[in-house]
Amino acid sequence: MRRRDRLLAKARNNPNSLNFREFEILLSRCGWIFDHQTGSHRIWYSPRGYRLPIQSKRAQAKGYQVREFLIQYDQGDRE
């Protein structure tokens, strides 16, 4: 199983369990592009142009941001 697939499974099983670095790796491996950072918000764009600002909470990804990513991914932002 590829790392992207493992991280996707982890995100689907429990969005709150993903650490911030894993979330960024998952975004990158799913074809999302890091654009810029403003303060604590890191702005990522999907292959279809959907904008997703993310930020960490004590080195953890925020669950609602992981869920937003999964919704966009499932709607067709796949490689």
Image (spheres, rainbow, N blue to C red):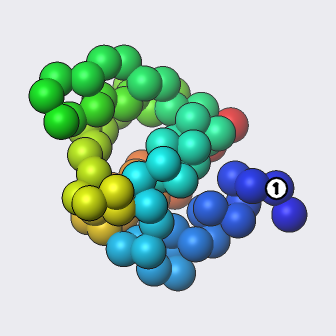
Disc 1 crowd rating (10 Å Cα; few below 14, some 14-19, many 20+) is few
Say if 67 sits above or below 17 in the image.
Answer: above
Residue nearest the viewer, comparing 18 with 67? 18
Q: Position of residue 32 (x, y in %)?
A: 51, 32
- Find numbered disc 1 in the image and state the secondary structure of the residue it sits on: loop
Regarding residue 36, the answer to whether it shows in the image is yes
The residue positioned 70% from the left and 65% from the top of the image is 6
| Residue furthest to the left | 39
Is 79 displayed left or right of 22 in the figure?
Answer: right
Q: Quadrant of residue 35?
A: top left
Q: Position of residue 15 (x, y in %)?
A: 41, 72
The residue positioned 43% from the left and 24% from the top of the image is 34
Is 36 displayed left or right of 23 in the figure?
Answer: left
Q: Quadrant of residue 70?
A: bottom left
- Which three-letter amino acid code belongs to the residue tagged 1? Arg
Q: Quadrant of the N terminus?
A: bottom right
The residue positioned 31% from the left and 67% from the top of the image is 63
| Residue furthest to the bottom | 13
| Residue furthest to the right | 1
Say if 66 sits above or below 44 in the image.
Answer: below
Q: Position of residue 2 (x, y in %)?
A: 82, 56
Q: Position of residue 12 (x, y in %)?
A: 52, 73
Q: Which residue is mark 1?
A: 2
Is 55 displayed left or right of 38 in the figure?
Answer: right
Regarding residue 65, the answer to whether it shows in the image is no
Say if 40 sits above or below 74 in the image.
Answer: above
